Image (spheres, grey):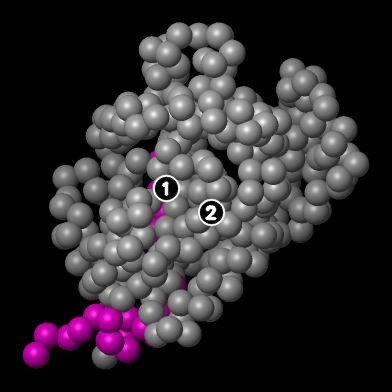
Amino acid sequence: MEKNPRTDLGFRALPEVVLAGPTAVGKSEIALLLAERIGGEIVSVDSMQVYRGLDIGTAKPSDIERARVPHHLIDVADLSEPFDAAQFVRLASAAVAGVRSRGRVPILCGGTGLYFKAFLEGLGTTPAADPTLRAELESLPLEQLLPELAKGDPLTFEHIDRCNPRRVIRAVEVIRLTGKPFSQQRAEWASRAKSPGVGSFGLMRAAADLHCRINNRVEEMFHRGLVTETRQLLERGFEQSPAPMQALGYRQVVEHLRGERTLADTVELVKLRTRQFAKRQMTWFRGQLSLNWLDLSHAEPAAVVEQIAREIQPRR
């Protein structure tokens, strides 16, 4: 008789399964099919899907997908609330414990590398945010912070998204609080990295394939109403929210609504920025996490899921 994966103690004994990779690679589809295959629940590892109201631009799972498989850490924060890696670790740990208590397998799926690393390896030694200093830095224009970052931490300056105020502000904040480069502290953190677990997978595609999927996803987001969603968020007064309205896609649409570029140019810019972001994600994952990489370029999702299931099945 064929085993029922939902009651197979072998899969239930797994601590968790990790599915990481760049945006639009196909993580969500694999996670859904895998959860159904092994009796799992999905824990989202996405720094923007935690926010209520950021739906289209973050490619949140649909109501139908959430009905198929339970999802966790989606819509857990208001746009006005700060959310960081420490909060993610706390909520994710509780979610994983809950999934295990139900005799199911936690599947951590997403593209926010820092959250993966914090959950798997600990939060590191970087200091907590200082409210007074953070407020001061947030009041300064990005053009004033970038030279300070370049001087204090050339390595981080070289690799950081310089158009993302949240990340630049955090890097400068750490430098000011500790007197040390942000990259040095992250290097010390990385030195404690673990070997890849039996269930740790990175998902990838050939560049041309991934770029095509990104372009299609961006066009679909605009078709579904990304501009309208962003306009509604602005009408609710969320333009000054420190993190959410700096999210990729929303930031460019806000600039379009201010009259800085046409809609057609905005769509193309979001495609470009998303492709650049995906490249940075791949670089980060390869350098910071130890993963077993699977190429999805010419593979059927069901076949990939079966490969993962075979690899994580404990030896009897």
Question: The C terminus is located in which quarter?
Answer: bottom left
Seen in the picture, residue 309 relative to 76 is either above or below; the reply is below
Seen in the picture, residue 308 relative to 299 is either above or below; the reply is below
Q: Position of residue 104 (x, y in %)?
A: 38, 79
At x 30% / y 61%, what residue is drawn?
Answer: 32
Q: Nearer the viewer, residue 42 or 192?
A: 42
- State the residue position of label 1: 60
- State the residue position of label 2: 75
- Residue 95 seen in the figure: yes
Question: The N terminus is located in which quarter?
Answer: bottom left
Q: Position of residue 105 (x, y in %)?
A: 39, 76
Tell me where the magenta segment starts and ends, as one range: 1-23
Seen in the picture, residue 112 relative to 167 is either above or below; the reply is below
Seen in the picture, residue 126 relative to 5 is either above or below; the reply is above
Q: Are marks 1 and 2 in contact (CB under 8 Å)?
A: yes
Is 229 included in the stretch rendered in magenta?
no
In primary-sequence order, the first of circles 1 and 2 is 1
At x 61% / y 59%, what residue is drawn?
Answer: 88
In terms of image quadrants, where is residue 306? bottom left
Question: In the image, 280: left or right of 114?
Answer: left
| Count of marks, rendered view | 2
